[in-house]
């Protein structure tokens, strides 16, 4: 019986020692796993921090993108406004050009007649052409015709003669065109006959009305450039 008990004791002792050995091994493994867990937790913390930073950067980039889009849209709107303003200015200039061309056509015959009257004096013709060529860039601000003196009846020809002054007044902002004629004595605002405050040309011509034939004839007598 003692032998059996001793044998059991030895068997239990061996089992206990084996368990102790396994316990130490498990403790070491536990420590290793704990260390790995701590390392992984640290990495998780780092990754979470990095993720937070990246999220912040993404937010900043999205804001920058939105700002850039808004800036681009504002710039496009500004350009559209500038284009509209330029188109309006071009339309206004075209209207002015058409108006000036209409005035020029309206009084072209009178100017041609003046040049014909001055045909013997080439220099005077050149002066008038220079004035018109240089000052037309400044713009005509008004054209006016005024009677000069009273009409005179001629019983011999049964006609009436009346003198007229044709005034072609140029824009007061004539320094912009750079012409030698237009760059002097400008003042504003534009005011025509009888309160002139701008460079102008006065063309005096005679109109004869034939009562028998009910016709008119025109003769240019002189012209004067005021500046």
Image (cartoon, grey):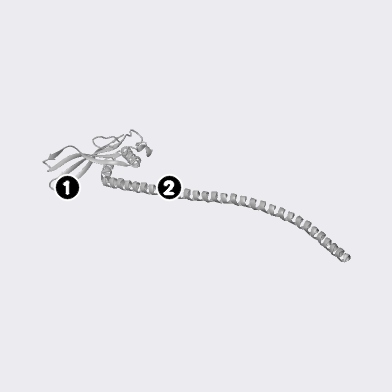
Question: In the image, is residue 20 above or below residue 149?
Answer: below
**Which label is found at residue 5?**
none
Residue at 56% across, 51% down: 58
Q: Position of residue 213 (x, y in %)?
A: 14, 48
Find numbered disc 1 in the image and state the secondary structure of the residue it sits on: strand
Residue at 17% across, 47% down: 215
Left or right: where does residue 42 sit relative to residue 177?
Answer: right
Q: Which residue is mark 1?
A: 215
Q: Position of residue 63 (x, y in %)?
A: 51, 49
Q: Position of residue 172 (x, y in %)?
A: 32, 37
Left or right: where does residue 64 sit relative to residue 114?
Answer: right
Residue at 28% across, 47% down: 102
- The crowding category of the residue bearing disc 1, from other C-alpha atoms within 10 Å (few below 14, some 14 to 19, many at least 20), is few
The extreme right residue here reads 3
Q: Are marks 1 and 2 in contact (CB under 8 Å)?
A: no
Find numbered disc 2 in the image and state the secondary structure of the residue it sits on: helix
Instruction: Using the numbered discs, state the Cα–Cα distance from disc 1 to disc 2 in whole angstroms.
Output: 60 Å
Q: Nearer the viewer, residue 97 or 68?
A: 68
Q: Nearer the viewer, residue 190 or 181?
A: 190
Question: In the image, is residue 52 above or below residue 187?
Answer: below
Q: Position of residue 9 (x, y in %)?
A: 84, 62
Between discs 1 and 2, the one toward the N terminus: 2
Quadrant in the picture for residue 118: top left
Left or right: where does residue 25 sit relative to residue 186?
Answer: right
Residue at 60% across, 52% down: 51
Quadrant in the picture for residue 5: bottom right
Where, quadrant-wise, is the N terminus in this rendering?
A: bottom right
Q: Which residue is mark 2?
A: 78
């Amino acid at each position: 019986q003692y032998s059996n008990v001793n044998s059991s004791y030895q068997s239990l002792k061996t089992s206990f020692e084996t368990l102790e050995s396994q316990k130490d091994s498990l403790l070491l493994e536990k420590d290793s796993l704990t260390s790995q867990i701590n390392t992984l937790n640290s990495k998780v913390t780092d990754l979470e921090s990095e993720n937070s930073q990246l999220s912040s950067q993404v937010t900043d980039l999205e804001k920058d993108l939105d700002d850039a889009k808004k800036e681009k849209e504002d710039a496009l709107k500004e350009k559209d406004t500038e284009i509209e303003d330029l188109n309006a200015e071009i339309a206004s200039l075209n209207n002015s050009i058409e108006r000036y061309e209409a005035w020029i056509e309206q009084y072209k015959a009178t100017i041609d007649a003046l040049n014909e009257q001055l045909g013997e004096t080439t220099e005077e013709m050149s002066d008038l052409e220079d004035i018109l060529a240089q000052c037309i860039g400044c713009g005509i601000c008004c054209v006016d015709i005024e009677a000069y003196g009273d009409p005179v009846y001629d019983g011999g020809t049964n006609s009436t003669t009346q003198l007229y002054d044709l005034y072609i007044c140029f824009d007061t902002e004539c320094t912009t065109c750079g012409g030698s004629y237009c760059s002097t004595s400008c003042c504003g605002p534009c005011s025509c006959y009888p309160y002139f405050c701008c460079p102008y040309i006065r063309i005096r011509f005679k109109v004869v009305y034939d009562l028998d034939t009910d016709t008119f004839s025109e003769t240019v007598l002189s012209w004067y450039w005021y500046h």
